[in-house]
Image (cartoon, grey):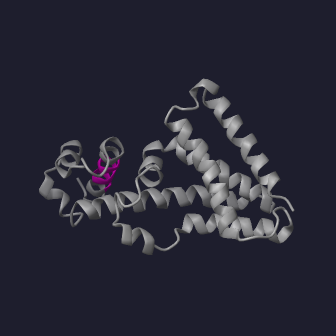
């Protein structure tokens, strides 16, 4: 098998193992078993467990950011913001394991608390801040701290999606019902931010 293909298979298996058992019980031996390679072979592609987990997160964020970038084609700032929320939803529903790895991990589980504090703002969050700034500039959203408003929007969409993925919203209907609730509540949130 070509090295690039082996690396991708290792990453996919690592994502699955991490999503199933978390960092504490994550095992290179289990990743190797699922990939069909030896544990030593993993070291030809990654320096160790931490490097492999970091690569899993990096890949998840890369794909997530690609989803968000699709929203930039919407015609108005408000539509770009709402479409970005929709792309967040699509990512979580279409790639739940990636979503869990990058958003439902305890702070410090993959990085030390110091690394978490010193980490730069992810490009995906900057995309959201930029949409908020556009909405503030065109009057769709009241003036304020764009990062604070972006955190509000993020907390809203993440909270709903995390509740859905963990099964807590099942009493409110199927996935189609959840998507209606998600979109309606996100529109209400954005409309509530008007000047």
87 relative to 125, above or below: above
Viewer-closest of 100 and 90: 100
Query: Residue, x 30% and y 43% (percent of image)?
Result: 21
100 relative to 69, above or below: above
Q: Quadrant of the C terminus?
A: bottom right
**Magenta stretch contains residue 62:** no
* Residue 104 in the figure: left or right of residue 50: right
Query: Residue, x 61% and y 42% (percent of image)?
Result: 160
Viewer-closest of 168 and 20: 168
Q: How many marks?
A: 0
* Residue 82 in the figure: left or right of residue 7: right
Residue 59 can be seen, yes or no: yes
Which of the 4 quarters of the picture holds residue 46?
bottom left
Q: Position of residue 120 (x, y in %)?
A: 48, 74
Q: Position of residue 109 (x, y in %)?
A: 34, 57
Viewer-closest of 145 and 10: 145
- Magenta part mainly helix, strand or loop? helix
Q: Which residues are magenta?
A: 8-15
175 relative to 63, above or below: above
Query: Residue, x 82% and y 71% (percent of image)?
Result: 137
Residue 87 can be seen, yes or no: no
């Amino acid at each position: 098998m070509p090295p690039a293909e082996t690396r991708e298979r290792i990453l996919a298996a690592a994502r699955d193992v991490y999503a199933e058992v978390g960092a504490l019980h994550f095992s290179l031996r289990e990743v190797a078993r699922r990939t069909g390679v030896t544990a030593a072979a993993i070291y030809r592609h990654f320096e160790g467990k931490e490097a492999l987990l970091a690569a899993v997160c990096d890949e998840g964020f890369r794909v997530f950011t690609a989803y968000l970038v699709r929203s930039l084609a919407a015609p108005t700032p408000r539509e770009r913001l709402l479409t970005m929320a929709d792309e967040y939803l699509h990512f979580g529903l279409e790639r739940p394991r990636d979503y869990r790895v990058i958003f439902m991990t305890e702070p410090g589980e993959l990085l030390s608390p110091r690394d978490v504090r010193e980490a730069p703002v992810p490009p995906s969050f900057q995309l959201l801040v930029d949409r908020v700034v556009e909405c503030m500039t065109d009057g769709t959203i009241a003036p304020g701290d764009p990062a604070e408003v972006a955190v509000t929007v993020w907390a809203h969409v993440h909270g709903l999606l995390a509740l859905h993925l963990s099964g807590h919203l099942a009493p409110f209907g199927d996935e189609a019902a959840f998507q209606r609730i998600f979109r309606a509540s996100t529109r209400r949130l954005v409309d509530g931010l008007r000047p």
